[in-house]
Amino acid sequence: MKPYKGQRECEHLLESWLEFADAIDSHPEVRRLLFDPVTGLPTTPLLLPRINVLLEERGEVSLLCVNVVRYSRIEEIYGWKVFDDVMRHVGETLSDLTGSTLRDADIVAELMVAGNAFVIVLSPPRSSLHMEADARQMIAQRVEVVVREQLTELIAPEIYSKFGCYVGSATVAAEENTRSERLVHQALDKAMHDSATREAVDAEKRIARLRRIIDAGDVRTLVHPIIDLSTMSVIAYEALSRGPAGSEFEHPDKLFRVAYDADLVMQLERLCRKRAIEAASGLPEGRKMFINVEPEAVADPELRDIVTNAILEDAQVEPDRIVLELTERAAISDFVAFRATLELLRALGFSISVDDAGAGYASLQCLAEVRPEWLKVDLSLVRGCDGDEVRCSLITSLVTFAQSAGVNLIAEGIENEAELDMVRRLGVKYGQGFYFGQPTEPFPADATFQGVRVDV
């Protein structure tokens, strides 16, 4: 980095914006300090001249803070490059809002280089000297809604599920005895606090909605077939829990994520299990039913009695036709107690499956401790395996393990004929995926799944 040439040159550079722009072009180190390298947007220091003008002319200036929350989860799971892409999309979306949701004279910037928040300096209202708080908050909410809507189209669903965006607002009022820079930073702190408050309120509302779903028992069960890849016959169905149709909680990931945040996992798990067992009452002869069980719920002291009584007395299904499938949403903290509970369930006739082998918490330790009868290959390994030697090698290693350990291996997420052919060639005996059909109400006719080509 070139040495900085001192205060006198800095004062010369700041004589006009034109000279300042020329200085930035000729001093890359200055640009790196003042412009975010990912979005290309200016940072807060470059807003101060515009804010000072507005304070002198109007006595106040209003601003928004767009806070990207839960950003650390995206970076931790997917890496900084993916998070940079998310921030780039947010920056582009905000810039595109000028002239529509925002006015042309509004200025979009980043709070700081490589941060997770944006600043928008709002132009003064046209019909009055001061901007009313309600009007400012209305703009903030409108920006928040549009950014979320745009981002659902721009980033992958699994990433968007970890994305959050809340917009806070504040007004800077001129004070004769306080430096304008200090006033700006105080207003930015207030706007950030406002966005955090909105996030907390939103979270409480989501939890309240989830409590109402649990209290009303408003969870339904769909089923998805598991196929014998040698005969293409249905050997089992997986019970899939869904929240109210068309709601934010329709997908189970959202249901359980909020449940974990609100310490409602046990209540939600019991409800989903109850609905799955009710569906099992119509299980066709010769089929098994896979019922998802959260690792935390295995510690439920009522699990053994609830499952056994409900299956034997209510559903009239023998336990040997039920597979308890351990999901990947949480890590297992106490394998000793966990294994003891599983052995009790096995003694009653149930078998155990581990979901998502090769991803998440389905670790080698989990396989060694649980020793499942069934094992599902994670869809991230199956997806595109027909053209990926590394994925094929990993699946082959799981096939070898399954053969030596006497485990039934299921390839999840098969979506096309090429993936089906590849997992067959690799020695996987069972499969599941949208190629065989979408999840549906219990229980579809087997004919639904007989149109798939079989080469044996």
Image (tube, grey):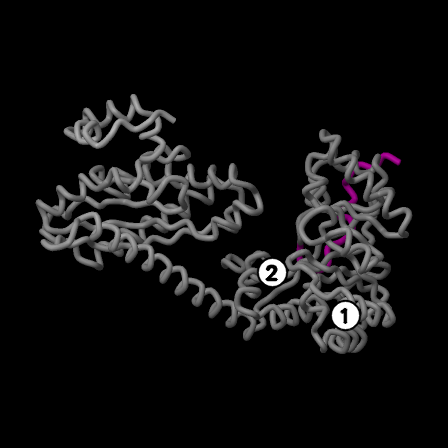
Q: Earlier in the sequence, mark 1 or mark 2?
A: 2
Viewer-proximal residue among 90 and 424: 90
Magenta range is 440-456
* Residue drawn at the location 20% of the way across and 53% of the way down: 183
Residue 294, image quadrant: bottom right
Mark 2: amino acid: Arg
* Residue drawn at the location 81% of the way across and 75% of the way down: 312
Viewer-proximal residue among 364 and 219: 364
| Side of 190 relative to 250 (left or right) | left
Q: Which residue is mark 2?
A: 242
Viewer-proximal residue among 306 and 343: 343
* Residue drawn at the location 82% of the way across and 56% of the way down: 368
Disc 2 is placed on an element classified as strand
Query: Callout 2: few (<14), some (14-19), or many (20+) C-alpha neighbours within 10 Å?
Result: many
Q: Which residue is mark 1?
A: 337
Query: Callout 1: few (<14), some (14-19), or many (20+) C-alpha neighbours within 10 Å?
Result: few
Task: Kindly report the secondary structure that dominates the magenta region of the rendered protein.
Answer: loop
Magenta includes 448? yes
